[in-house]
Image: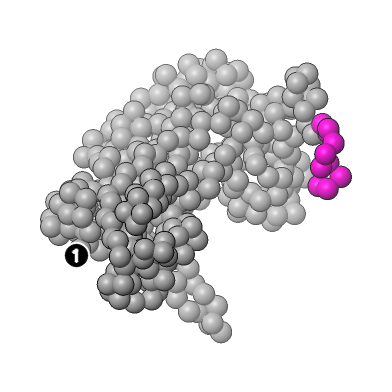
Amino acid sequence: MSMHIGRDFVPPDVPGKVTGEIKYAEDYKAEGMVFARLLTSPLPSGRVVNIDASEALRMDGVVGVFTADDLPPVAPPGNPALASEYVTYVGQPILAVAATTEEIAESAIDAIRIDFERRDFVTDPLESLTPGGSNAYPEGNVLVRTREEGPEGTPILSAEIKDIKWPQSAVDAMRAGRSPEGGEFTTNWEFGDLDAAFAEADEVIEQPFVTIGYPHHSLEARTCMAYWENGKCYFHGSSQSQSANNAGLARMLNIDLADLVFINEATGGGFGSKIGPYPFMAITGNFSRVLNRPVQLRITREQEFYIGSARSGIQGWIKIGCRNDGKVTGIDLAIVNDGGATGGGSGNSSAQHVTVCLQPEAMRYRGISVYTNTTPRGAQRGPGQNEMAPILAPLTDKLAQAIE
């Protein structure tokens, strides 16, 4: 990097981007390639009762329909590429259709009939934590990760969906901007003597806060193209890395890593949402193997909004104590993450951000990520840190004014 300091230089991908000569995933074609399109859920929550694709399959140019039955099941906290029985957000992919042209594939999507059984939906994490509140999933509303010691000390990591409800008093306290005492959290840690830290403080402030989640919405909507030769999968995809997603993608395709060739010449933005393999990569690769011909799956701009991931929103409460010399003595922090349909949350990163910035002598953190019937959530540009940045900045000013 030192060779570029103080000098003008042109990144190697810039000329191709400026002239339009560089190739993105959707620019790649292969002989015999067919085009896939997704049929997505119109409901935020429901059960798929019946799928009738008979009319679509009779259409000239349609070569196949791909459903969750054609993919291996995904255990939580995995985000399934295609919904099997239950849909949990508007825009969730249910099936894919492949045809000789994109127009035929889109017409085939319109010809498919799906019967749904509606379920209650929830968009507010606190509403779901309320006694009697709706759950985003039939099994529950919170993703709980566990860590156990296996043979020879090898850690065994697992996760399951649980139904967690708070006492009404804890929900009311959180909504009123107070500490949600009595509420159950899934992440708890602390250090130092918190009671002593607040007792030593010259000034103590408490503040509720809310940050909104918002989609990544990369300029380049996700596109994948895959084909198979001699047992190897050649996969063109939009990714933030040439290698970080390969192991996960190989597992999606149930092949050895050595049998995957991943090609990504250019990416039109990712902002954290394209670091790893995204679920519908599994559709493209497996559909291609079933059909024994190249398949390209290009999603629409609208679908990118729904399935392209988003930053998680948080509702929280924080208490900070400091001495007149500006030293922060203690912090008490509680965060409820809106995990969307995939349970993603970055509250623990938010708490770590607080410790780094304010260097408290003592701190307690309580966090929980709640499923809602909204779009999937994931890492976006400093996950956790950027949610807390607009909270800490005005609070730091408030503390400074208090000790002047």
Instruction: From the viewer's perspective, tell me whether residue 391 is left or right of residue 102.
Output: left
What residue is rendered at 77% in x and 28% in y? 14
Instruction: From the viewer's perspective, tell me whether residue 208 is left or right of residue 376.
Output: left
Q: Residue furthest bottom?
A: 152
Q: Is residue 55 visible?
A: no
The majority secondary structure of the magenta stretch comes to loop
Q: Position of residue 350 (x, y in %)?
A: 43, 55
Q: Is residue 52 above or below residue 147?
A: above
Q: Position of residue 343 (x, y in %)?
A: 39, 50
Q: Position of residue 12 (x, y in %)?
A: 81, 33
Nearest to the observer: residue 69 or residue 156: 156
Q: Quadrant of the C terminus?
A: bottom left
Q: Is residue 55 above or below residue 206?
A: above
Which quadrant of the figure has residue 220?
A: top right
Nearest to the observer: residue 317 or residue 165: 317
In the image, what residue type sits under mark 1?
Gly
Instruction: From the viewer's perspective, tell me whether residue 102 is left or right of residue 215.
Output: right
Query: Which region is colored magenta?
Result: 1-10
Q: Is residue 32 magenta?
A: no
What residue is rendered at 57% in x and 19% in y? 102
Which quadrant of the figure has residue 256?
A: bottom right
Q: Is residue 7 magenta?
A: yes
Nearest to the observer: residue 84 or residue 184: 184
Q: Position of residue 255 (x, y in %)?
A: 66, 53
Which quadrant of the figure has residue 205?
A: bottom left
Identify the residue position indicated by label 1 in the image. Answer: 182
Nearest to the observer: residue 177 or residue 93: 177
What residue is rendered at 48% in x and 68% in y? 157
